[in-house]
Image (cartoon, grey):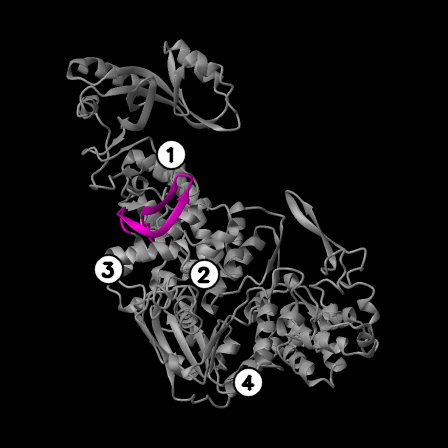
Amino acid sequence: TEIYDYMRLLWARIGIPHCPVCGKRIQGQTIHAMVEQILTFKPATKIIILAPFIKDQKGEHRVIFEQIKKAGFARVRVDNTVMDLNEAQNLNLDKQKKHSIDVVVDRLTVSVEDKGRLSESLEKALNLGEGMAKVMKIDTDGKTEKHGLDILFSQNFACPDGHIQLAELDPRDFSFNSPHGACPECKGLGTKLTVEPDLVIPNQRLTLAEGAVRPWSKTTSRLSWYSRIMEAVAKEYGFSMNTPVKDLPKKFVDIILHGTDGKKVKVAGEFATREGAFEMMTAFEGVIPNLERRYKETDSEYMRGEIENYMRIRQCQSCKGLRLKPEVLGVLIGGKGIVEVSGMNIETVSDFFKNLSKVLNQKDATIAKQVLKEINARLSFLLNVGLSYLSLDRSADTLSGGEAQRIRLATQIGSGLTGVLYILDEPSIGLHQRDNQKLLQTLKDLRDLGNTVIVVEHDEETIREADWVVDIGPGAGKHGGELVGEGTPKDIEKNTKSLTGQYLAGKEFIEVPKRRRPGNGRKLSILGAAEFNLKDINVDIPLGKFVCVTGVSGSGKSTLFHDILARALYKYFYNSKEEPGKHKKILGVEHIDKIINIDQSPIGRTPRSNPATYTGLFTPIRDLFASTKEAQMRGYQAGRFSFNVKGGRCEKCAGDGVIQVEMNFLPDVYITCEECHGKRYNAQALEIHYKDKTISDVLEMTVDEAKIFFINLPQIHKKLETLSQVGLGYMRLGQNATTLSGGEAQRIKLASELSRASTGSTLYLLDEPTTGLHFADVKRLIQVLNKLVDKGNSVVVIEHNLDMIKTADWIIDLGPEGGDKGGKLVAFGTPEDITKVKASFTGQYLKKIL
């Protein structure tokens, strides 16, 4: 964002505008050309010549009115209303709102005879408006003046053919967050929600009479308005309501979807009024225009949500997804617009700005010198933390946690501060080993400036490069929290109590499999993948194997497997509305029965979600408490032991265990409920015990404790066992979902899948599941994933961790670089095959450990 601020300033100061219609360079108009353009107006047209004085500025502007009065003018236009100057001075404008003030220079009727006066008035307006003037056409209707749109004239920016005039460029004109620069159609979003025909008529085998038009299917009884008007349309245009939509000619389907273009039809039935009954003639607007109009007009969130069921997010057709006004998109520096440059990856952008001064004239180079210095410095910081593959316009919500953290790190390097304590949580997330060294050098640079850098990290290379290591453990959760050891990496290696040290010393390690699985002989094939930086590649995914997708950061891994494969399969199996990325086709879908994407998104966003509820553990536990003798005597059902419904929950906190205190402009504060003391249940529910434990006590148990407690109950014990297998034995059953890390949430999802009955034909997709895992946890995770594959399923993992990559049956390596230089299939095969491919960075690092 900071770089983009400097870019907007640069484009506003030295950018060369071009007409979006004819492409010609926009230059200043002469007064003669302005006069000639006005004389083309319809004869006797009344006009007002205005000089723009203030544009969208806050304040009361009393001083401005005084200046205009001293200059000898008697009328002004304030916020599009023409008035006497005395009247304007008594307005008491709201100083907190933005106002625009134009000076009325002259009012006249267009005629060739008044050419001299017109020229003088325009010159006066241009002098007063610093090269800008406005002409407003007015129509006289009795005593009322109807003001038309302004025609803008500029001595600075105007198309030679008169297609467009521009005001003086301002940095905010290049911001899609400002109304001055944002595309008016999509308000700067680049996308619009549009009603989709295939969602409006999802089943074309149905007839219109049977409710083929889904939004109106609930209201297509014989007496409904929609049914009657569709019958009238069918009668007028000669098609049947009882013909399946798939058999109707396209022109009739278009009429139903888009309307009769103003042509009226006679609606059957009588419509009663005081004057009597009558038959109604009305135009049919069509289903899609009807939904779009209602979506814009309604204030009901429920109604908007209902209509959104028939809508998809599509690229704005006005700006083609570029988010800015057309006239701004035509402003070029070095032959490129600001959107084109911000769409480049950081490495390419850096080259562009470093070479820009060579193509600028002396004047522009002088203006740009300081701005370019600031831009180049910030780009170099981003390059140093391994983000060369990102584009400047990359949306923040698409960044991984590691990428966002490294961007903030780059900002800190640029600040040049000393004496600062920096704390980073796993900055190596999402980084290939090839890029890790750049990150480590950046951290050392921060240290060498006189700062202290603390890094919470599991990456072996980072640990070995540290000056001092603090090892916490020995286990996790209640089994951890102790200082196991501290010292140099060599000291930790010698510490026999340190599990980290044992892995560093090579006493503990993750073994390479003795054999690679042959698979089941079937495959999924992605053909013509061309989304983002993918170079129209074909990729085969063997089924019945443990597959690792590798490559440097930004090589196209997530694009290929999330944006294309996952979305396409979700659409195929679950009728998802999300459109897959650009590709030709996917073959072999019949060989799998479903896809399960186990990502790191939260399992819930409120304190009500926890591991017990997500995995389905809580249902049999509640049933168990309801089956106790005491509960049956009182007539308690399982619902009495739910903190989500009335009955057993504490009503003071509504079962949350905490009270939320809103702090207005500060973050909300959560305090323990004084009524239940955080137990979430009322006194009656807590009087019921199972083996001397209340339902609240059970939720406070760790997975390992609960596993022993419920050892004789297979339905509960099996789910607890899978949670323990994925390394979550330390976690409390009732731990709030909001306190879980991304890696913990992912492993809970994984455990939930493991506890289900396997079909043996499922495709599991995981994105960097080793995030946040210690060497020992990675070892356990690999064992869990292998269990899934051993049942006949297929597991695809996007990963940078070499310990996991070396255990895979098959590797798909993308690259060779990130961004524009990536997107190719570099290598595929077993890990041993990959080591033989010189172009593969993954292969080079694998070679050292195999």
- CA distance separating discs 4 and 3: 62 Å
Asked if residue 259 shows in the view, the reply is yes
Of the residues shown, which amino acid type is indicated by label 2? Lys
Q: Are marks 1 and 4 in contact (CB under 8 Å)?
A: no
Question: What is the x, y in percent for residue 371?
Answer: 40, 40
Of the residues shown, which amino acid type is indicated by label 4? Lys
Tag 4, which secondary structure? Answer: helix
Q: Which residue is mark 4?
A: 787
Q: Which residue is mark 1?
A: 170
Of the residues shown, which amino acid type is indicated by label 3? Gly
Q: Which residues are magenta?
A: 260-287
> In the rendered image, which quarter is residue 159 located in?
top left
Q: Which residue is mark 3?
A: 238
Q: Which residue is mark 2?
A: 218
Q: Nearer the viewer, residue 493 or 246?
A: 246
Q: Would residue 523 appear left or right of 673 to someone viewing this image?
A: left
Q: Nearer the viewer, residue 555 or 613?
A: 613
- CA distance separating discs 1 and 4: 61 Å
| Label 2 vs 4, first from the N-terminus | 2
